[in-house]
Image (spheres, grey):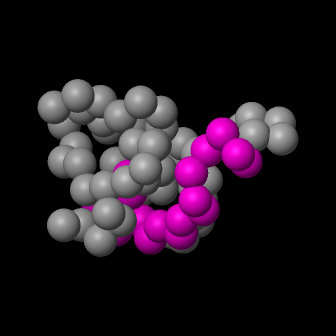
Amino acid sequence: MVPPLETIRTTSHRVACDGASDIPGGAALGHPRVFLQIDDGGTVDCGYCDRRFILVGGPADGADQSTIRDHGDGAGR
C-alpha cells in the first residue's frame, strides 16, 4: 500500500475536509466540503484529496500508516 499524501491528527471523531483549509483564501482550489466520521480503527480518509485524519490516542495514532487499509468513503467500505 502507498501511504496517504497527508495525515492530520485530530481530537474529534467527526472532521470536515475541503482540501484547501491550509491555503489562505484557497477555497476555490480545494474540493466540496465533506464531513467524515473516524471509525473504530482510528482513521478516516478523504475520498477527494486522500488526506488521512487520525484520532489522537486512537489505535492508529503512531502506527505505520502504510499498513492501514484505505477506506476513502469514510464508511469503512
* Relative to 7, 77 lies left or right: left
Q: Residue 75: which quarter of the image? A: bottom left
Left or right of 36 in this view: 45: left
**What residue is rendered at 74% in x and 35% in y?**
23
- Using the image, determine if residue 2 lies above or below residue 74: above
Please state which of residues 28 and 62 is positioned toward the viewer in this rendering: 28
Q: Residue 67 versus residue 35: which sits nearer the camera?
A: 35
Q: Which residue is at 75% across, 40% downward?
A: 26
Residue 62 visible in the displayed image: yes
Q: Quadrant of the N terminus?
A: top left
Quarter occupied by residue 33? bottom right
Q: Residue 69: where, in percent of width, then height?
A: 19, 48
Number of residue marks:
0
Which residue is more in the foreground, 33 or 64?
33
Q: Residue at x 25, y 56 (%)?
A: 71
Q: Is residue 11 above or below residue 23?
A: below
Q: Position of residue 51 (x, y in %)?
A: 46, 43
Viewer-closest of 12 and 23: 23
Residue 24 higher or lower than 33, as above or below: above
Residue at the extreme right: 25
Where does the image place residue 63, in percent across and percent down from the top left? 31, 38
Point out the stretch of residues depicted in magenta.
27-45
When asked about the image quadrant of residue 50, the answer is top left
Instruction: Tell me residue 46's x, y (percent).
Output: 42, 53
Find out whether residue 41 is within the magenta segment. yes
